[in-house]
Image (cartoon, rainbow, N blue to C red):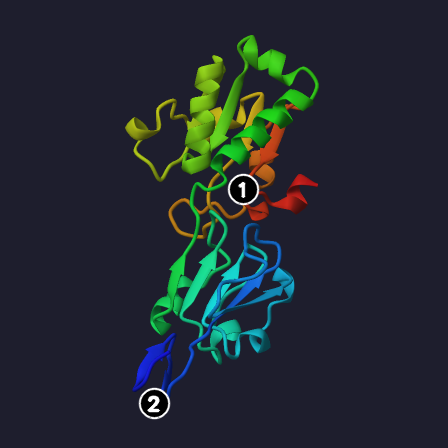
């Protein structure tokens, strides 16, 4: 309760006693959101793919996953002052627009790293004799050495499994086991973990196209644990 002039999330009330409510619009599939928010918070849950500008006309906060494109067309008529993404990647967020509008942005790099590593190891163990081959000297090729790629490399090291890493954005001395893309594509298992970017000189968009895919061995296990567009899926088909 306040008397006088007070600003919250870009809205002002003047000269009257008022109770301020923080209004949040969130993807309904984000885990951990309180079913009954604290007093002073109004939470609206919307399907991520269905979040539209009309849902945000009086919202202070927007919480999304990767299925919601956040840009000028979504936010231009809204008073949103904070956008949070429960994801490691942020290619679905127009951060330049948010910065221009003074909208604060946060995401969750590394939050799912351990889960993705466990998924990759599970996939390896589930496919034929792949795990046995790796334990007897075959190698895993890792593309991308961020939160997930580096965690996977550490786990493979602990298991005594040989691995090679391709990440041209990083100093080879930092990466360890650094190799060329050709060497990584020659491995028995190739697993993808770069962020999706069009940035030059090493864009990851369609990093594996027809030419790169043709280099894979006939029995290579290819795991894309990153964004779909890292691979040219038409070439893959």
Of label 1 and label 2, which has the lower sequence position? 2
Q: Which residue is mark 1?
A: 226
Residue 3 visible within the image: yes
Q: Residue 79's x, y, as percent? A: 44, 77
Q: Secondary structure at mark 2?
A: loop
- Determine the residue positioned at 47% across, 12% down: 160
Relative to residue 40, is residue 52 drawn left or right?
A: right
Asked if residue 192 is positioned above or below residue 125 in the image, the reply reads below
Place of residue 171 in the rendered image (x, y in percent of width and height, measured from the top left) = 30, 33
Q: Find disc 2 in the rendering and name its residue.
A: 14
> How far, Cα to Cα, is label 1 from label 2?
49 Å
Give the residue drawn at x 34%, y 71%.
102
Task: Kindly identify the residue that appears in the image at 59 percent across and 58 percent down.
Answer: 35
How packed is label 2: few (under 14 Cα within 10 Å), some, or many (20 or more)?
Answer: few
Residue at the bottom extreme? 15
Residue 144: in sight, yes or no? no
The quarter in which the N terminus is drawn is bottom left
The residue positioned farthest toward the top in the image shown: 136
| Closer to the camera in the image, 120 or 37 | 37
Q: Position of residue 5 (x, y in %)?
A: 30, 85
Residue beneath the point at 53% across and 72% down: 74
Which x, y percent locates residue 174? Answer: 30, 29
């Amino acid at each position: 309760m306040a008397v006088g002039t007070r600003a919250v999330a870009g809205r002002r009330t003047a000269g009257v006693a008022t109770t301020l409510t923080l209004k949040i619009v969130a993807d309904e599939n984000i885990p951990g959101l309180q079913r009954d928010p604290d007093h002073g918070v109004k939470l609206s849950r919307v399907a991520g793919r269905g979040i539209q500008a009309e849902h945000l006309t009086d919202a202070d906060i927007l919480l999304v996953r990767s299925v919601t494109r956040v840009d000028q067309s979504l936010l231009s008529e809204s008073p949103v002052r904070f956008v949070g993404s429960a994801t490691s990647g942020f290619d679905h967020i127009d951060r330049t627009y948010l910065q221009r509008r003074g909208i604060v942005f946060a995401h969750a790099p590394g939050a799912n790293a351990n889960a993705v590593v466990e998924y990759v190891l599970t996939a390896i163990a589930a496919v034929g004799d792949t795990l046995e081959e790796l334990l007897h000297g075959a190698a895993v090729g890792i593309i991308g050495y961020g939160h997930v790629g580096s965690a996977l490399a550490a786990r493979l090291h602990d298991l005594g499994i040989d691995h090679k890493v391709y990440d041209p954005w990083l100093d080879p001395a930092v990466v360890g086991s650094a190799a060329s893309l050709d060497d990584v594509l020659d491995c028995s298992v190739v697993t993808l973990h770069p962020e999706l970017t069009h940035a030059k000189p090493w864009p990851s968009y369609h990093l594996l196209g027809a030419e790169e895919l043709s280099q894979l061995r006939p029995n290579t296990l290819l795991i894309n644990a990153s964004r779909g567009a890292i691979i040219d899926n038409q070439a893959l088909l």
